[in-house]
Image: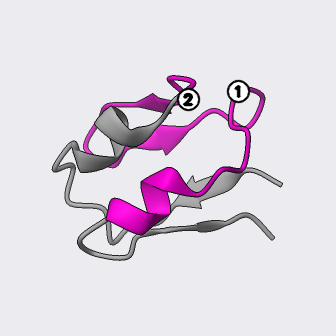
Amino acid sequence: MAYVITEDCVACGTCIDECPVGAISEGDIYKIDPDVCTDCGSCAEVCPTEAIHPAE
């Protein structure tokens, strides 16, 4: 199950450096490509606003 980024994202960029597979793209609210995400959770662990969660 891939992770998703919610509207709580402040586009700080912290998660991009943590993603080992480059699944996160920049924007007003960052997005995670579910086809690339390996469900490692590294991005969620470093998100300062807790905007990243497992997809349901």
Residue drawn 25% across and 44% down? Answer: 28
Q: Amino acid at mark 2?
A: Ala
Q: Is residue 3 left or right of residue 14?
A: right
Mark 2 lies on residue: 23
State how far apart marks 1 and 2 are (Cα): 5 Å
Q: Is residue 14 left or right of residue 32?
A: left
Circles 1 and 2, Cβ within 8 Å, touching? The answer is: yes
Residue drawn 21% across and 42% down? Answer: 13
Query: How far across and how far down the image is residue 7, in percent?
Result: 39, 67
Tell me which numbered mark, 1 or 2, is placed earlier along the sequence.
Answer: 2
**Quarter the C terminus occupies:** bottom right
Residue drawn 33% across and 49% down? Answer: 29
Image height check: is 3 above or below 20?
Answer: below
Q: Amino acid at mark 1?
A: Val
Image height check: is 46 above or below 38?
Answer: below
Determine whether the residue tagged by mark 2 lies in a helix, strand or loop.
Answer: loop
Disc 1 crowd rating (10 Å Cα; few below 14, some 14-19, many 20+) is: few
Determine whether the residue tagged by mark 1 lies in a helix, strand or loop.
Answer: loop
Query: How far across and how far down the image is residue 25, in percent?
Result: 41, 29
Q: Main secondary structure of the magenta part?
A: loop
Mark 1 lies on residue: 36
Query: How far across and how far down the image is residue 54, in percent?
Result: 69, 66
**Quarter the N terminus occupies:** bottom right
What is the span of residues highlighted in magenta in the rendered image?
21-46
